[in-house]
Image (cartoon, grey):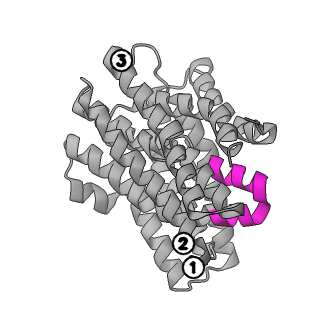
């Protein structure tokens, strides 16, 4: 099965940023106060700006994109259902709720980079449509599970979650034909650029590999990695063949399903009092493994 070297190299910058964040915390002795402030900045300002800016500018051709969206949605639904089985392992409810999101959430930055490498602007546009529509259900499922096992009310957390609010606002603005001034678009673009870098640095700064859990916790992490990097892309691959998809839409659907967990999963777990250390480990391990798994899955297409 061929491995696309260019695709593997496309993943290196994101993983390098995670490693850089981990190194900066230890070399520069940056304390919890600094990283806590950085997490809040990314979660409440930068990530929402990135989501809104991407959605408000997207040109969505719903008819031609429908089969691709169906495959992506089915793969993510499969990840959500299979991820529930991790609760059968003897881990704490809040640890399960935190890690559960790593079974289906996706790193859109890597997705856009890989889609652009394969198909240029059309690939980026197609991935943007998928990401824009899959963010709301992914965030809803992640926030609901964390709120259900935490101390906060589910409805309250959903209503005030900045990622969900930004996504809904972006879709509404897109459907309403809102055209922002160039200055506003550039401003949001700058915030979005910062979100990519600082979000991945925050993931690295939050790494807690030593003492992160016992055998059951490691089993849960291994299972969730298999769901995200093997089961989800397998579902997408089978559906692509069943629907007869080809070209950019087939590649984008498969890439989306094979993406590692999003860096925002760690930030969400931290903000809602979850097991951020284990989530950070899962994101880092998944990103490293996806450097091999994504080219391998694409070699099957």
Q: CA distance from mark 1 to mark 3?
A: 47 Å
* Residue 194 drawn at (x, y percent): 63, 50
Q: Element type at marker 1?
A: helix
* Residue 235 drawn at (x, y percent): 49, 49
Q: Nearer the viewer, residue 27 or 149?
A: 149
**Range of residues picked out in magenta:** 109-126
Q: Is residue 195 above or below residue 202?
A: below
The residue pinned by badge 1 equals 63
The residue pinned by badge 3 equals 213
The residue pinned by badge 2 equals 66
Mark 1 nearby-residue class (10 Å; few <14, some 14–19, many ≥20): few
Mark 3 nearby-residue class (10 Å; few <14, some 14–19, many ≥20): some
Q: CA distance from mark 3 to mark 2?
A: 42 Å
Q: Is residue 78 left or right of residue 171?
A: left
Q: Element type at marker 2?
A: helix
**Quarter where residue 159 is shown:** bottom left
Q: CA distance from mark 2 to mark 1?
A: 5 Å
Q: Is residue 140 visible?
A: yes
Q: Residue furthest bottom?
A: 177
Mark 2 nearby-residue class (10 Å; few <14, some 14–19, many ≥20): few
* Residue 196 drawn at (x, y percent): 62, 48
Q: Element type at marker 3?
A: loop
Q: Is residue 48 visible?
A: no
> Residue at (37%, 47%) from the top-left corner?
80
> Residue at (46%, 65%) from the top-left corner?
167
Instruction: Kindly indicate whether the residue at mark 1 contacts the one at mark 2 (C-beta within 8 angstroms).
Output: yes
Q: Nearer the viewer, residue 213 or 183?
A: 213
Badge 3 or badge 2: first in the primary sequence? 2
Task: Assess whether residue 115 is covered by the magenta stretch.
Answer: yes
> Residue at (36%, 42%) from the top-left corner?
82
Residue 273, label in figure: none
């Amino acid at each position: 099965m061929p491995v696309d070297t260019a695709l593997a190299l496309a993943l290196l910058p994101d993983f390098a940023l995670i490693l850089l964040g981990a190194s900066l915390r230890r070399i520069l002795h940056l304390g919890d106060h600094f990283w806590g402030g950085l997490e809040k900045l990314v979660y409440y300002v930068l990530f929402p700006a990135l989501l809104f800016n991407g959605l408000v500018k997207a040109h969505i051709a719903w008819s031609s994109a429908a089969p691709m969206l169906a495959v992506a949605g089915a793969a993510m639904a499969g990840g959500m259902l299979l991820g529930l089985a991790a609760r059968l392992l003897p881990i704490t409810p809040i640890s399960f709720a935190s890690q559960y999101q790593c079974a289906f959430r996706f790193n859109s930055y890597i997705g856009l980079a890989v889609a652009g490498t394969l198909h240029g602007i059309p690939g980026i546009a197609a991935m943007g449509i998928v990401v824009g529509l899959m963010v709301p259900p992914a965030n809803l499922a992640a926030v609901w599970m964390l709120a259900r096992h935490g101390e906060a009310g589910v409805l309250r957390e959903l209503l005030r979650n900045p990622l969900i609010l930004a996504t809904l606002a972006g879709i509404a603005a897109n459907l309403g034909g809102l055209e922002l001034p160039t200055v506003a678009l550039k401003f949001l673009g700058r915030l979005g650029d910062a979100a990519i870098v600082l979000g991945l640095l925050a993931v690295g700064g939050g790494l807690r590999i030593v003492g992160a859990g016992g055998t059951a916790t490691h089993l849960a992490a291994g299972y969730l990695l298999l769901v995200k990097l093997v089961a989800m892309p397998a579902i997408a691959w089978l559906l692509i063949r069943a629907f007869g998809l080809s070209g950019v839409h087939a590649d984008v659907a498969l890439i989306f399903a094979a993406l590692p967990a999003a860096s925002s999963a760690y930030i969400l777990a931290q903000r809602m009092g979850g097991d951020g250390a284990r989530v950070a480990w899962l994101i880092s391990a998944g990103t490293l493994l996806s450097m091999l798994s994504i080219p391998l899955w694409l070699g099957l297409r």
